[in-house]
Amino acid sequence: MNALVVEWMQKAAGDLTVAERELRARKAPVYDASCYHAQQCAEKYLKAFLVSVKHTPPRIHNLVGLLNDCLSYDTTFATIRHLTSFVSTSNF
């Protein structure tokens, strides 16, 4: 597997770990931080896929745009399109 794909996937897995850890926090979990890291995780996995198909991922944080790029290579990404309604448009 391409080293850059592996790097993107490792970073995505780290974001998922942080998101899950925050959700399990017993004292004052910070849900918006968990959501942020979940969104970062999704972004990095989408970019990993794009790199795997020899497509340079755009320097954007727009999950819908990234998903559309992925769809041009693999239509099975359509099965997660409904999740875009949950995407935050702001990091604040």
Image: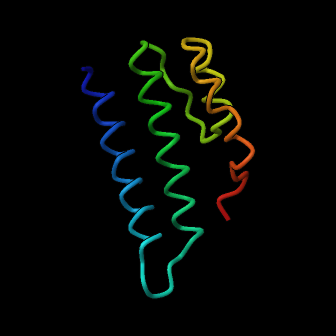
The residue at 38%/18% (across/down) is 52
Residue closest to the eye, 37 or 29: 29
**Image quadrant occupied by the N terminus:** top left
Residue 21, position as x, y percentages in the image: 38, 68
Residue 9, position as x, y percentages in the image: 34, 37
Residue 69, position as x, y percentages in the image: 61, 20
Residue closest to the eye, 69 or 57: 69
Furthest residue toward front = 79
State the colouring used for the structure image. rainbow
- Examine the rendered structure and indicate whether residue 16 appears above or below residue 27: above
Q: How many marks?
A: 0
The residue at 52%/40% (across/down) is 43
- Examine the rendered structure and indicate whether residue 35 appears above or below residue 48: below
In the image, 6: left or right of 82? Answer: left
Quadrant in the picture for residue 5: top left
Residue closest to the eye, 78 or 8: 78
Residue 70, position as x, y percentages in the image: 57, 21
The residue at 42%/84% (across/down) is 26
In the image, 23: left or right of 69? Answer: left
**Image quadrant occupied by the C terminus:** bottom right
The residue at 50%/49% (across/down) is 40
